[in-house]
Amino acid sequence: MTLTEENYIKTIYQLGKYGVHTVSTNSIADALDTKASSVTDMMKKLAEKGYVNYKKYQGVTLSETGKKIAAEIVRKHRLWEVFLVEKLNFFWDEVHEIAEQLEHIKSEKLINELDKLLDYPTHDPHGDPIPDKSGDIKKTDKVLLFNLEANTKGICVGVKDTSSVFLKYLDKQKIALGSEITILSREDFDDSMVIKIGETSMTISQTVASNLFVKKV
């Protein structure tokens, strides 16, 4: 399997909520910043190899083989992110691009030993679940901060936007995984929120609130 094929399968897996839902070719094209016609050509190719189930105008799902391969790729990516943060002291906004390269390493023994070294983590530095060796995922009960009402609390357990610019913004605001966030009020005009973390109060925009996953407490 080529690196490009692996990237397509991983994208379908993630867009389809870990291989559960059908994914449109347009959404794949948007995610990979490529033409819909190129996606269609690749889907036909992957279908011939038995990695996806594809019907024109109906979207695509992963076959059982495709799901297994995709879960392995995602597992490697997220384990490498944990390694880079915990063992090499990278910041969480620095690891995605490096993990994109490392996820294509084929050695199963290396990845299993990496998992053992890290004490079998269930989530990566951004709060995303890490598939185990069987491809199973330990899901977290989480909602977007934006969906909580005023005078409620949540523990930050993940981010929807993993871009470097957003993660750096969170660092600047001292918002991190594990932070307890109290919603003090929300503004009807623009859906911004006044929140409190520790002893610090701040106003965050709708965009920020819509990209933070929390576990309600």
Image (cartoon, rainbow, N blue to C red):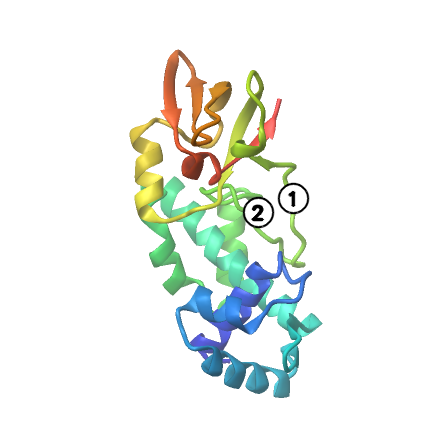
Q: Residues within 10 Å of mark 2 (few under 14, many from 20)?
A: many
User: Residue 24 got which mark?
Assistant: none
Under mark 1, the amino acid is Lys
Q: Nearer the viewer, residue 187 or 152?
A: 187
Q: Position of residue 18 (x, y in %)?
A: 62, 58
The residue at the point 43 percent across, 19 percent down is 197
- The residue tagged 1 is 139
Is residue 88 something that shows in the picture? no
The quadrant in which residue 168 appears is top left
Q: Position of residue 69 (x, y in %)?
A: 59, 69
Q: Earlier in the sequence, mark 1 or mark 2?
A: 2
Under mark 2, the amino acid is Pro
Q: Position of residue 68 (x, y in %)?
A: 64, 67
The residue at the point 48 percent across, 52 percent down is 78
Q: Nearer the viewer, residue 190 or 181?
A: 190
Q: Position of residue 105 (x, y in %)?
A: 44, 67
The residue at the point 59 percent across, 30 percent down is 215
Q: Callout 2: helix, strand or loop?
A: loop
Q: How many marks?
A: 2
- The residue tagged 2 is 129
Q: Nearer the viewer, residue 193 or 76?
A: 193
Residue 120 is left or right of residue 19, and the answer is left
Up-down relation of residue 26 to residue 90 (above or below)? below
Answer yes or no: do the residues labelled 1 and 2 have beta carbons within 8 Å?
yes
Q: Nearer the viewer, residue 217 or 4?
A: 217
CA separation in Å, label 1 and label 2? 6 Å
Is residue 37 something that shows in the picture? yes
Up-down relation of residue 52 to residue 122 (above or below)? below
Q: Callout 1: helix, strand or loop?
A: loop
